[in-house]
Amino acid sequence: MSISRVGQIALTVGDMAASKAFFVDVLGLKLLFDAGPGLSFVDGGNVRLMLGLPEGGGVVGRNSCVYFVVDDLSAAYAAALEKGADGADGPHLIAKMPDHELWMAFLRDPDGNLVGLMEERR
């Protein structure tokens, strides 16, 4: 078996309308399609995000984190906050590699899921 990339990430959400508004209106992602009232798909760049309502007592906002690569971390984080996003942790250095630094910041979606923004600075 050979895995080439992540194709889809599933996020359990509690309020579909609020979650779609966060990912589409706040983060600027494209809504791909809805598959009934409890399932929506959003284009996250090279990864599709599946937003789904919990089935059978599922827990919302505890274990999910999606990371988005951005060109300018500080600007992206500030823009998300200006649009009403909940800031969980501002831009900070995660690791220094020989050829670049990895910087991240974190937001929370309406269900408390972490949404990471990441920039590789060279």
Image (cartoon, grey):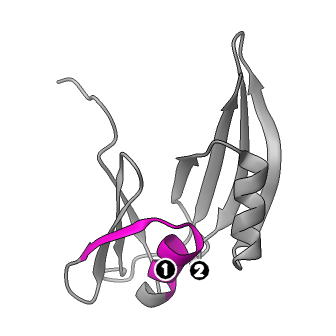
Toward the top, the furthest residue is 98
Element carrying mark 2: loop
Q: Earlier in the sequence, mark 2 or mark 1?
A: 1
Q: Splitting the image into 4 quarters, where does residue 75 fall? A: bottom right
Residue 82 against residue 94 in the figure, above or below: below
- Label 1 secondary element: helix
Task: Quarter of the image for the C terminus: give it.
Answer: top right
User: Magenta segment: does it hold 32?
Assistant: yes
Q: Is residue 59 above or below residue 93?
A: below
Q: Which residue is mark 2?
A: 110
Residue at 41% in and 56% down: 44
Instruction: State if disc 1 and disc 2 touch (CB < 8 Å).
Output: yes
Mark 2 Cα-neighbour bin, 10 Å: few <14, some 14–19, many ≥20: many
Identified at 49% across, 80% down, the residue is 19
Residue that mark 1 sits on: 19
| Three-letter code, disc 1 | Ser
Residue at the image position 26 percent from the left and 90 percent from the top: 37
Read off the magenta span: 18-33
Quadrant assignment for the N terminus: top left
Q: Is residue 60 visible?
A: no
- CA distance for labels 2 and 1: 6 Å
Q: Magenta stretch: residue 46 in it?
A: no
The answer to whether residue 73 is above or below residue 56 is above
Q: Position of residue 14 (x, y in %)?
A: 47, 85
